[in-house]
């Protein structure tokens, strides 16, 4: 059993089984704790091997890729790091670059000038203060230039397996539609999710919500009719309206 799978234990007294045949009415009548459990179980089944799609070999490479990913797709970031990391694989190598050289390497990434400055500065700080290694501490991570709470959370979980719930635009949108959170801010949403999702599931649930937001619960025209979580989704049920049996 994977560590996160133990997170389902104790959420409710009896196991829940997600089924496309479950009626919308039955889903709407479920106690809130049970409804959340079924949502998480469904996401786990849909995306059993969910993980970051940013390609990396080390925590440092993940940190750099995550900084690059702001307002940029993972696919484009992977193209950029495929040419950057072979010649500059670690903090020492990037710290030795000039800002002009780094800008040239990441020019096809949005906000490349500010990102180049931050990546160069954080690389030099890692060399000076941490022996070139990425710290496993949130405060130390967030003290690095260009590293905010979301980036730190991604690195803590995906690089070190430390439970953290990163909230990006996909997580914010999907968690609100599913009724898992309602606070309009990323930090408020994170706090709600951390209260309502078992700690062992924070990292995996982050990836489940991202993938669901990319593939099904997209920003415009979400694919509610084909979504297996529809019976438990307040926003999806509102969009779809009453079923023929309920009319």
Image (cartoon, grey):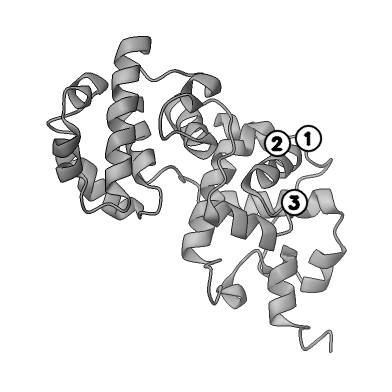
10 left or right, relative to 117 = right
Pick the residue in front: 127 or 216.
127
Task: Please name which of the two marks, 2 or 1, marks the residue nearer to the observer.
Answer: 2
Q: Secondary structure at mark 1?
A: loop
* Residue 151 spot, x, y in % from top left: 47, 37
* Residue 37 spot, x, y in % from top left: 73, 48
User: Is the Cβ of the residue at disc 2 closer than 8 Å to that at disc 1?
Assistant: yes
Residue found at x 65% / y 42% = 187
Check residue 10 in the rendering and tell me which mark sits there, or answer none: 1
- Judging by the rendered image, the residue that carries numbered circle 2 is 198
Q: What distance separates the C-alpha of mark 2 from that of mark 1?
A: 9 Å
Residue found at x 53% / y 56% = 170
- Judging by the rendered image, the residue that carries numbered circle 3 is 36
46 left or right, relative to 70 = right
Q: Is residue 76 visible?
A: yes
Pick the residue in front: 236 or 139.
139
Q: What distance separates the C-alpha of mark 3 from that of mark 1?
A: 13 Å
Q: What distance separates the C-alpha of mark 2 from that of mark 3?
A: 11 Å
90 left or right, relative to 31 = left
Q: Residues within 10 Å of mark 2 (few under 14, many from 20)?
A: some
């Amino acid at each position: 059993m994977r560590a996160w799978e133990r997170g389902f234990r104790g959420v409710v007294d009896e196991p829940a089984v997600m089924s496309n045949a479950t009626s919308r009415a039955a889903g709407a009548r479920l106690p809130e704790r049970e409804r959340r459990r079924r949502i998480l179980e469904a996401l786990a089944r849909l995306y059993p091997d969910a993980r970051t799609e940013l390609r990396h070999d080390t925590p440092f490479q993940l940190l750099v890729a995550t900084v690059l990913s702001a307002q940029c797709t993972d696919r484009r970031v992977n193209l950029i790091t495929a040419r950057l990391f072979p010649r500059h694989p670690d903090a020492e190598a990037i710290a030795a670059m000039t800002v002009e050289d780094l800008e040239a390497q990441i020019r096809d990434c949005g906000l490349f000038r500010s990102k180049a400055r931050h990546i160069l500065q954080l690389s030099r700080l890692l060399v000076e203060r941490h022996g070139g290694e990425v710290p496993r501490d949130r405060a130390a991570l967030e003290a690095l230039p260009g590293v905010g709470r979301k980036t730190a959370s991604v690195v803590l979980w995906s690089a070190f397996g430390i439970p953290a719930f990163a909230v990006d635009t996909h997580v914010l949108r999907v968690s609100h539609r599913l009724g898992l959170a309602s606070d309009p801010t990323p930090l408020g949403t994170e706090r709600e999710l951390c209260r309502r999702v078992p700690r062992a599931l924070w990292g995996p649930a982050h990836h489940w919500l991202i993938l669901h937001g990319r593939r099904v619960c997209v920003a415009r025209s979400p694919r509610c009719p084909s979504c297996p979580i529809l019976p438990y989704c307040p926003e999806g049920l509102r969009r779809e309206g009453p079923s023929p049996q309920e009319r």
